[in-house]
Amino acid sequence: MLRYFHSGGSANTRHGDGSLSTTAPGQEEADKFMYDPRDPVPTTGGNHLMTMNYFRGPLSQEKVEERDDILVYLTAPLASDIEITGPVKVVLYAASCAPDTDFTAKLVDVHPGGKTYNIADGIIRSSRRNQSAAPELIMPGEVYEYRIDLWATSNLFKAGHRIGVEISSSNFPRFDRNTNTGVSGRDSADLQPALQTVLHNERYPSHIVLPIIPR
């Protein structure tokens, strides 16, 4: 089942106007954020094996969602329980001013009081958007389709909860920062900020694919 991204161009932070619905978008203003690899989004929970300085599993996401470099899209409060079981994928239409960058996606469960917990997440490097081909830099300003694999999961979103998606460009240190230069951070200390644009309109309908189990 698809849930499409919508906004009036201000989906930044958990207080923005981003929404998710089954209705495909029409003509809508794109969302923008600045990704600065010198100030990456910190890893907050998730499926990782890092040291105990970084707690694993579902953690509260409210603090990290206050960042302006995170776009947040939410459904309306659910009228009934929704179970998802299986692979989750985000299809993102985005542009960057950089020749190479990353895009991240995170599925979250928003409780009626606003408490938010991560369910699944993933990342894609723009130069490796075609996984079966050799790495290829992008043209700055050009729109590309990115298919972000959030892997398989299972969760029951209870009635009154909201299904949410976070979009950003880093999840550090779980994933290495993209320098936005086209050169690996292993080979260069040059870190450049990049303006990222996420589109959700009739031509570029960004969305999440959820494996909803009929009840």
Image (cartoon, rainbow, N blue to C red):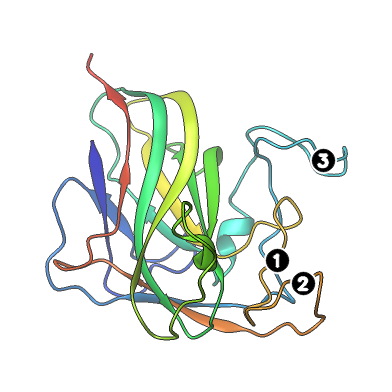
Mark 1 vs 2, N-terminal side: 1
Disc 1 secondary structure class: loop
Mark 3 vs 1, N-terminal side: 3
Which amino acid type is marked by label 2? Gly
Pair 1/2: label in front: 2
Above or below: residue 87 compared with residue 179: above
Which picture quadrant has residue 45?
Answer: top right
The residue wearing badge 1 is 177
Disc 3 secondary structure class: loop
Residue drawn at (54%, 47%) of the image: 122
Mark 2 vs 3, N-terminal side: 3
Foreground pick, 105 / 163: 105
Residue drawn at (63%, 57%) of the image: 64
Judge whether residue 21 can be spotted in this image: yes
The residue wearing badge 3 is 50
Residue 89, given in percent of the width and then of the height, sits at 39, 43
Pair 2/3: label in front: 2
Which amino acid type is marked by label 3? Met
Asked if the residues shown at circle 1 and circle 2 are in contact, with their CB atoms under 8 angstroms apart, the answer is yes
Residue drawn at (17%, 45%) of the image: 22
Rounded to the nearest whole Å, what is the CA distance between mark 2 and mark 3? 20 Å
The residue wearing badge 2 is 185
Residue drawn at (37%, 55%) of the image: 73
Q: Is residue 175 left or right of residue 115?
A: right
Residue 26, given in percent of the width and then of the height, sits at 12, 67
